[in-house]
Image (tube, rainbow, N blue to C red):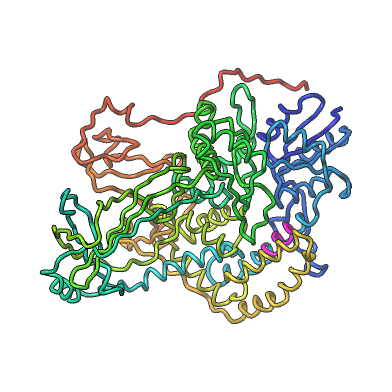
Amino acid sequence: MADKLIIVESPAKANTIKKFLGGNTKVMASMGHIRDLPKSKMGIDIEHDFEPEYINIRGKGDLIKSLKKEAKNAKQVYLATDPDREGEAIAWHLAHILEIPEDSDCRVTFNEITKETVKESIKKPRKIDMNLTDAQQARRVLDRIVGYKISPVLWKKVKTGLSAGRVQSVAVKLIVDREEEIEHFIPEEYWNIYATLLEPNAKKEFQATFFGKGNKKMEIHTEEEVKEILKAIEKGKYIVADIKKGEKKRTPAPPFTTSTMQQEASRKLGFTLKKTMSVAQGLYEGVNVGEKGTVGLITYMRTDSTRISEEARAIAKTVITEKYGANYYENRYYKTKASAQDAHEAIRPTYIDLDPEKIKSYLSSDQYKLYRLVYHRFIASQMAQAIYDTVSADIEVNDYHFKANGQTLKFKGFMTLYVETLEGEKEEEDTSVPELIVGQEVMKKKLEPKQSFTQPPARYTEASLVKALEEKGIGRPSTYSPTITTILERRYIEKEQKQLVPTDLGKIVNQLLIENFTDVINVEFTAKIEEEFDGVAEGKEPWKKIIREFYGPFEKEVEKVEKELEHVELVEEVSDVPCEKCGRMMVIKYGRYGKFLACPGYPECKNAKPIVETIDVPCPVCGGTVQVKKSKRGRKFYVCENNGKTCEYISWNAPKVGEEWHPEQQEEKVKKTTRKKSTKKKTTSKKKK
C-alpha cells in the first residue's frame, strides 16, 4: 500500500516526479482527460440549464480501473495535473471518478518540475479551484454548442465533413481578409534619390537620402518630379547645414510567454507551433541531464505573463556579473499586459547553472535549440541596454536637403547574448558618417534616383498569426497551436513557403459564416467572450450565465439560416492534365495525404493519381525530370523520374546546376533514418489453460 498516490497527466512527468520522491509514493499518469463530452452527440442538456453530459473516454476503462484501485489503497491522493484551467478541469474529473470530495485538499501544482519545487508543493495541497474549472467548462460547452449547431448547416448547404468553431473560424477570417487586402491592393509609385558624397579631406564615402525642400519633407511620386529636383540641384554645392550627435539605447525583450516563444521559435528555428509546444512540453516534464538526474529544464510553457520570481532574478544576476561583468547586469521588471491571466511566471530555465552548452549531449537537436533560445532570452532580459552612438548630418544644396544618418554600437549589453527578431525586421547594422563640420562643403560623387512601389501587406505566417490573435484577444496561450493545426487539417488554409494562404474551400466557408453568423464569427465577439471566461476564472460571474445569454439569440440565428440559406455549389479546381482513360480534364481534390488528381467522371471513370511536384534543375545523372516526394515522416527528398528504370538518382538534397553525382554517393546522399532497435530480448509468458 502506497502512502501517497500522485496523479499527473503524462508518463514522462510521472517518471520525473517519481525519481524526486521515491520511497512509498506511487506516481501515475491519467494520459490527459479521462472524461469528456461524447463525440456522437452534442452532450449538452439544453433543457436543464446547459448541464454537460460527461462520459468516460472510450479506451480508458482499464486505466480508470487501475487509478481507482491505487486510489483506494493509498492513504492520500494528490492530483498534480498541469497548472492551468485545462489541468484544473482534469483534476476535477479525476476527483469525481475517484470519489474524492471536492472540498478536500487534494490539488497540487508545479510551475517548474524540480526536486525542491515538487517536494514543497506536496506539503501545501489545496482544494480544486472551481472557478478555473468552470472557466474551462464554459469554453468547452460554448464551443461545443457553436460547433454542433453551425457545422450541420455547412454539411447541408456546402458539403459533408466541414466544421465551424468560434476561434478557428475567426482565425480563418483573418487569413481570408488579409488575402483580399493583397488581391485588391493597388501599388503606388514613389521615388527616392540617393546621394553618394565624399568628405573632402579623407575622401571617405558616405550616403545621404533626399529629404525635402527647406525644412519640409517632400514625397516624390513621379519621374517628372525627380527630374525637376535633379535639375534644380545640378550645379549646386553640397554644404553641411547641421550635425546632431546623440545616443540611442536598445532594451532587451522580456522573457518568453507562450505566444512570443512560438513566434521566435518559428522565425529563428523554423519550428511549427505544434513542434514548439511538443518540444517545450518535454523540456518542462523532464530530461535526464547526467549528475543532476531527470529534471524539468523550463518552467510551465503555457503562460501569458512576463513576471519572474525574485529567486530566479537573483541567480540571473550572479550568472551575468560573473560571466560578463557588473556593468552588463540591470535589475529589470517587465509590465505584463492588462488582459493577461498572469497565473504563472514567464517561461525561463529552472536551473540557471545548466547552461545549454553544458547539457547539449543529453538533449535532442530540437530540445537543445529550443532550450538555448529560452535560456538566452531569459538571461538577456536581465542584462543592460545596448548603446549606440548616433550622428545625423543635414546636407543642403540649393535649398534642397539630404539626410545622412549613422550609428555605431558602443556597448553591446544584452546583444552580446541575444537579439529578438521581429516579423519583416532587418537586423541593425553599423553605418558610419565621417567627422563633418557645419559649413563644410562635401563633394558629390553620384546621384542615384530609384523608383519603387508600395507593397501589399504580407501574408500571415504561423508566427504573425499568433501575434495577431493575441493582440486582438482571440484565444489564449493554450489555444493558438491547436487552432492553427485544426484549420490546416480542415484544408481551410494551406502553407506556401511558410505563408498561410486560404483555399477556395476556406474562402467559401468563411463567406458563408460571416454573412449568416455575423454575431458569432467576428473578432469583437470572440475577444469579448474570452474576457467573460477570464471573469469566470476570477470568480466574478457563474459560467452558465454566459451560456444562457449567448444561446437564445444564437439559436434563432441558426434557425433563420437553415430556412433561408440556399445550397452553395463548390466548383472544383480544374487542372491542365487530361484523364488518360476518358479524356476529361482532371480536377484537384483533397485526400488524407494532401492534393491529388481525380477524373470528374466518377463513378463512371474512377481514374485518380497523385500530383507530382517537380523542380527546374534536371537530373545530374541522366538529365530527366527531378520529382519532389515526401517520406513517411514528411521529409522532402528528390528522385529522378527514371529512378528504378534507367537511373539511380535519389537524394535528400535538391540537385544543383552542374552538380556531378555518382552511384557510390548514394549512401552519403540518402541516409534513411531508422529507430534504434532495442537490444533487449522480448519475453513472452504463456497463460496456463
Tell whether 319 sits left or right of 76.
left
Q: Report x, y in % for residue 539.
A: 79, 61
Tell whether 652 sits left or right of 501.
left
Tell whether 545 sits left or right of 273.
right
Residue 639 to residue 19: above or below? below
Q: Tell me what residue is drawn at x 30 percent, y 40 percent.
A: 654
Q: Quadrant of residue 375?
A: top right
Residue 160 appears in view:
no
Tell whether 454 sits left or right of 554.
left
Q: Which residues are magenta?
A: 135-143
Q: Which residue is nearer to you in this view: 460 or 137? A: 460
* Dominant SS in magenta: helix
Residue 190 to residue 119: above or below? below
Look at the image and tell me in which quarter the C terminus lies: top right
Q: Tell me what residue is drawn at x 64 percent, y 28 percent.
A: 294
Q: Report x, y in % for residue 629.
A: 37, 43
Q: Report x, y in % for residue 151.
A: 61, 66
Q: Tell me what residue is drawn at x 38 percent, y 52 percent.
A: 497
